[in-house]
Image (cartoon, rainbow, N blue to C red):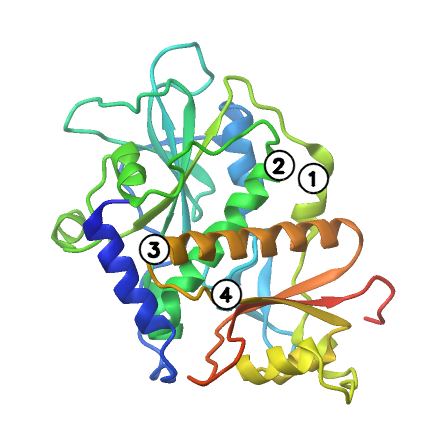
């Protein structure tokens, strides 16, 4: 990771783990950039685009507490606060014959189609001749809701998306520098998110390029994994609230206390991960490891018939002995709905 990227990430992490509460919500901005370019039907371009579509197409709407639908679409991959900041970019280099021609594409959730981005600066391709999916986050909605706590949540959302894709496309793999911010930007031929001038001049809002995944020439989809992930739903908070909390102190009470979310007490069990001790390149890598492991456990438990809801937004006191950064709250198979 470039020194400038690391310095920026470290400053954001230090701010994210401060004990201060977020301020009032800010205007969230658009759900996704409307990139200019040629629209491409998903059905015409093979398994890679189909995998993105399965994970990110709208599956109804998130409900309000009274059961009425909100305007927030539900997707197969969970997201903190239903913000869904992850954006899916696809880089197809020239070379072997593929169903999708060379270019840089982005999934447009509004039309549920790919957009082939124009590239006025001329074609420059990654060293590998394999297709890459690049995960970016459009930070506005998460920041508008969680303010200074947003940076670990962007990593969490991207990690859950990354692990879902690796399960859905089992022969996909991560290059050695998969989480290098500069390498992800180079693959997309996009500038840094700050300063924002380049983006705003084009009618876009900045995106943070976080991770890259490579796919083989002819990927196949694991239909069993696809069915399990696409059927996944985070259980409603009412399912936790209606259950009596256990009186003894355990991982549930600790996660509820540190997150300030009492619904966690209704879980059958909770798995938590402590915050990285260092807020540097090592700590940033550990953030990815923590959230990738949480995502793997979530999808495995879901496939076994359990219900899982992620717990984020931890804000432990400065003297906390074991400050948490993430947890998953589990309702065991057979728990009454």
Q: Mark 3 or mark 1: name the one nearer the start of the chain.
A: 3
Badge 4 is on which residue? 80
- The residue drawn where x is 57% and y is 23% is 219
Q: In this view, does 212 lie to the left or right of 262?
A: left
Indicate the quadrant containing the N terminus: top left, top right, bottom left or bottom right: top left
Tell me the element at label 3.
loop
- Secondary structure under the numbered disc 4 in the rendered image: helix
Which residue is labeled 1 in the image? 225
Cα distance in 3D space between marks 4 and 2: 21 Å
Q: In this view, does 243 lie above or below 117?
A: below
Give the residue number, with chain letter if any, for mark 2: 168
In the displayed structure, 153 sits above or below 58; it is: below
Q: Could you tell me residue 288's position as x and y percent?
A: 47, 52
Tell me where residue 35 sits by quadrant: top left
Circle 2 — which element?
A: helix
Q: Contact, CB < 8 Å: mark 4 with mark 2?
A: no
Q: Do the residues labelled 2 and 1 touch (CB within 8 Å)?
A: yes
Whether residues under marks 1 and 4 lie with C-beta atoms below 8 angstroms apart, the answer is: no
Q: How far apart are marks 2 and 1 (CA)?
A: 6 Å
Q: Do the residues labelled 2 and 3 touch (CB within 8 Å)?
A: no
Determine whether 197 is above or below 222 in the image.
below
Circle 3 residues within 10 Å: few <14, some 14–19, many ≥20: many
Q: Name the residue under label 3.
A: 138
**Residue 204 appears in the figure:** no
Q: Residue at x 24, y 51 (%)?
A: 5
Q: Where is residue 181 in the image (x, y as percent from the top left)?
A: 30, 45
Mark found first going from the N terminus, 4 or 3: 4
Q: Distance between the residues labelled 3 and 1?
A: 27 Å
């Amino acid at each position: 990771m470039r020194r400038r990227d690391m310095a920026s990430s470290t400053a954001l992490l230090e701010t994210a783990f401060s004990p201060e509460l977020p301020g009032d919500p800010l205007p969230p901005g658009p759900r996704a950039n409307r990139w200019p370019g040629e629209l491409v039907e998903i059905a015409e371009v093979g398994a890679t685009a189909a995998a993105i579509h399965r994970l990110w197409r709208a599956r109804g709407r998130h409900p309000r507490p009274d059961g009425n639908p909100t305007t927030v679409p539900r997707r197969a991959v969970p997201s903190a606060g239903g913000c869904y900041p992850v954006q899916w970019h696809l880089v197809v280099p020239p070379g072997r014959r593929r169903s999708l021609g060379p270019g840089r594409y982005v999934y447009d959730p509004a039309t549920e189609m790919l957009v082939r981005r124009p590239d006025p600066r001329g074609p420059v391709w990654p060293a590998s001749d394999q297709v890459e999916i690049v995960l970016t986050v459009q930070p506005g909605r998460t920041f508008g809701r969680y303010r200074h706590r947003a940076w670990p949540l962007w990593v969490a959302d991207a990690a859950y998306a990354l692990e879902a894709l690796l399960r859905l496309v089992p022969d996909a793999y991560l290059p050695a520098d998969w989480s290098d911010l500069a390498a992800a930007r180079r693959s997309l031929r996009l500038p840094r998110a700050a300063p924002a001038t380049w983006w705003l001049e084009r009618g876009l809002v900045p995106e943070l390029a976080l991770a890259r995944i490579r796919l083989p020439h002819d990927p196949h989809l694991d239909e069993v994994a696809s069915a399990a992930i696409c059927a996944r739903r985070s259980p409603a908070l009412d399912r936790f609230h209606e259950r009596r909390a256990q009186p003894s102190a355990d991982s549930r009470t600790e996660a509820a206390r540190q997150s300030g979310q009492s619904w966690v007490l209704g879980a059958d069990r909770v798995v938590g991960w402590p915050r990285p001790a260092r807020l540097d390149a090592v700590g940033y890598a550990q953030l990815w490891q923590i959230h990738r492991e949480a995502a793997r456990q979530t999808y495995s438990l879901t496939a076994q018939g359990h219900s899982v809801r992620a717990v984020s937004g931890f804000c432990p006191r400065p003297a906390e002995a074991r400050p948490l950064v993430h947890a998953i709250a589990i309702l065991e198979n057979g728990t009454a709905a």
